[in-house]
Amino acid sequence: MKYSRLTKEQFEELTQEFTNFLATQAIDKAEWDKIKLEKPEVAEQELDVFSDLIWEGVLSRATFLEHFSKNHIFLFECFDTHVQSIVLKSLVPDVDFLTREGLQWLSDNMFTETIEMKVGKKEFTEERNSSIFQLIQQGAFLSDGQLYQQINSIIKS
């Protein structure tokens, strides 16, 4: 398996897609129930293959990621060969970016000496989607890129 198996909740959300996936292999509901009962290892393989297909599609379309921690915000824009990053760090230890108050504080103090901002670029050393998946495994999540684009446009002007 290249990525990770989808959660039970994710499979539930993708029931129709999974049904279509099985149908492409000429597996109907009765056949699937039989496979689960008689060949659980084959059922497990099917779940893994489907999970990888879904992840591959999601990661191929991924453009922006965000990762928030108590004192840092990591913003990423993903390209074909590299990722651009903007890292915001609070120099005030009791600010918590995981709270609404912390984000309001960031908004009020964005361009003061209490926020350290770094911009970076990293070439992908392995396959693009695997690299993006690693960021997700570390706590990043897909985003619409609004925050990245706002900060990036201010930095560039």
Image (cartoon, helix red, strand yellow):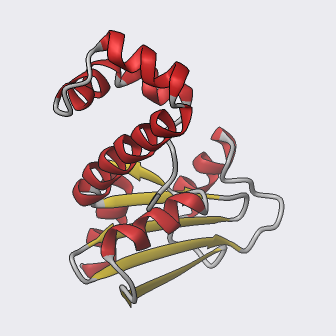
Where is 39 relative to 109, above or below? above
Is residue 150 something that shows in the picture? no
Foreground residue among 52 and 105: 52
Is 92 on the left-hand or right-hand side of 87?
A: right
Name the residue rendered at 42%, 76% in the picture.
85
User: Residue 63 placed where, x, y %?
Assistant: 27, 60
Residue sitting farthest toward the front: 38
Residue sitting farthest toward the top: 30
User: Residue 26 placed where, x, y %?
Assistant: 19, 26
Foreground residue among 133 and 77: 133
Is 19 on the left-hand or right-hand side of 76?
A: left
User: Residue 100 placed where, x, y %?
Assistant: 64, 39
User: Residue 140 placed where, x, y %?
Assistant: 52, 57
Foreground residue among 132 and 36: 36
Which quadrant is home to the C terminus? bottom left
Name the residue rendered at 45%, 44% in the picture.
45
Q: Place residue 14 in its image quadrant.
A: top left
